[in-house]
Image (cartoon, rainbow, N blue to C red):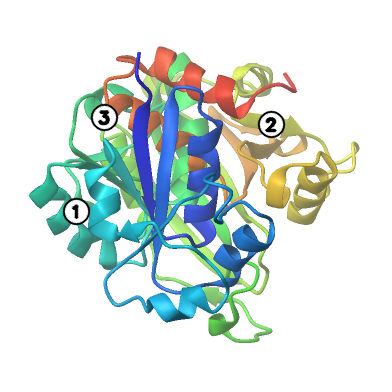
Amino acid sequence: MAKVRVGVAGYGTIGQRLADGVAMQGDMELVGIADLVPSLSIRALRENDMIGANNVEYKLYLVDGADPAAFAKYDIPVAGTFEDLCKSVDIMLDSSPGGVGAKNKLIYEKLGVKAIFQGGEANSVADVFFHGYANYEKGVGVDYLKLTSCNTTGLIRTVDALDRAVGVKKVAITIIRRVADPGDYHRGLTNALQIDKAPSHQALDLMTIMPHVEATGILVHTPITHGHIITVIVTPVDGKKITREQALEIFRAHPRIRTVTIDEGFKGNASLFKYARDLGNRRGDMYEIGLWEDSIVESGNDIMYAINIPQESVTIPETMDAIRAAMKMQLTREEGTAETNRYLKIGRFK
C-alpha cells in the first residue's frame, strides 16, 4: 500500500514537530515543508545536513512573499513554491500563524487537497473539530479537520477516558497557563499573573467535542514557558461516584497519560520537561501528558486531579490521528490511535 503523502505549512514551534511526527510514521511520507523566511529552525536543518543538495530528508518550499535570495544567503536549497508542494501531497498539515490557514484553505480547495489545521485557526475553517480519542470516527473521510488547542487536547484525554469508563456529567477546570513558548520574546518580560474572563475557551471547546458534558473553567496566565498545569473536577452521571482507585486505574491504562508522583521527583512542570530531555527526546518533547497521582482526590462523588500539558508537542499525536481519519487509513479510534502510538513509541513506559 502506498504511503500517504503529507506536507507541512509553517515550520514554527508546532510545524517542526508535525514534520518530525510524520517522518516517524512508517505509513506516511513527508513530502516537504513550506515557510516564509529562513528562520533559525530552518537554518538549523541546513546546518545539520537535513536539508541540502545532498540530502532530501526535508525539502523546502516557499510561500507567497518569501524572498529566495534570503534563503540562498544561507545556502538553503528551495524545491519550489507552496502550490508545488500542495500539488505533490494527499494532505496538508497547516501550522501557519492564526488566520493564515484560512487563506491557505482557498489554495487547498482549488487543488483538491485535504488539510488539517491547528488550534490557532477559527473552528469555522474546518468541517470537523477533531480529537483522536473523543471523536475519531467523525473525522473519517472528511476533507478539512481542525485540532483542539494543546490544553484542550490533554484535558480531553483524561475526561474522555473517565467518560468511557463511568460517564461524565460535567467538569470544572482551572488552567495555569504558560505565557509563551521558549524563545518567544514578543510576549515581553513580565513578573505578573493575568486572569481571563470565565469560561475559558478550553471549556467551551471541550463541550464542542463532547456536547453531552457540561464544562466551565478559569484560566490564569503565568510568566513561565515550559508547560501548563490544569486542575480538573469531574462529576459523574446519574449520581455515580468515581473513587480515587478507579480513576488511577483508568489513567494508568491510557497510553497518552503518564502518571507520576511527587515522591518520584516530579515536583512540577520543570521536572517533566527535564525528564523528557534526560530521556533523549528530541527538543525535550513529551507526547504524553503528566498526571500527578498525588493530586487525585475524592470530593463527594466528584474526582479531582492535576495534569501537566507539554504545549509544544502534545497535539502531535492527535494530528497524526487526524491524518489517519481523513485519509481513511484506519476507520476506528482504537485502530487509528494504536498505529499513531506505535510509530511515535507512545506508552512504552507502561
Q: Disc 2 to disc 3, how far (Cα)? A: 28 Å
Where's residue 181, x and y in %? Answer: 59, 66
Q: Is residue 204 above or below residue 252?
A: below
Q: Which residue is mark 3?
A: 326
Circle 3 Cα neighbour tier, 10 Å, few/some/many (<14 / 14–19 / ≥20)? many
Disc 3 residue type (three-letter): Ala
What residue lies at 89% left-to-right and 36% top-to-bottom? Answer: 264
Q: Relative to the observer, which residue lies in front, 227 or 56?
A: 56
Q: Which residue is mark 1?
A: 125
Where's residue 180, x and y in %? Answer: 57, 70
What residue lies at 68% left-to-right and 34% top-to-bottom? Answer: 296
Q: Which residue is mark 2?
A: 258
Kindly report which numbered mark, 1 or 3, lies closer to the viewer in this rendering. 3
Q: Quick one: label 2 or label 3, which is nearer the N terminus?
A: 2
Question: CB atoms at circles 1 and 3 under 8 Å apart?
Answer: no
Disc 2 residue type (three-letter): Arg
Q: Secondary structure at mark 2?
A: strand
What residue lies at 34% left-to-right and 34% top-to-bottom? Answer: 5
Q: Is residue 3 left or right of residue 141?
A: right
Q: Is residue 216 above or below residue 210?
A: below
Quadrant location of the N terminus? top left
What residue lies at 50% left-to-right and 41% top-to-bottom? Answer: 316
Kindly tell me whether residue 253 is visible in this rendering: yes
Kindly tell me whether residue 122 is visible in this rendering: no
Q: Relative to the observer, which residue lies in front, 27 or 239?
A: 27
Circle 1 Cα neighbour tier, 10 Å, few/some/many (<14 / 14–19 / ≥20)? some
Where's residue 103, x and y in %? Answer: 19, 64
Q: Residue furthest left?
A: 110
Disc 1 residue type (three-letter): Val
Kindly report which numbered mark, 2 or 3, lies closer to the viewer in this rendering. 3
Q: Quick one: label 1 or label 3, which is nearer the N terminus?
A: 1
Q: Is residue 161 left or right of residue 101?
A: right
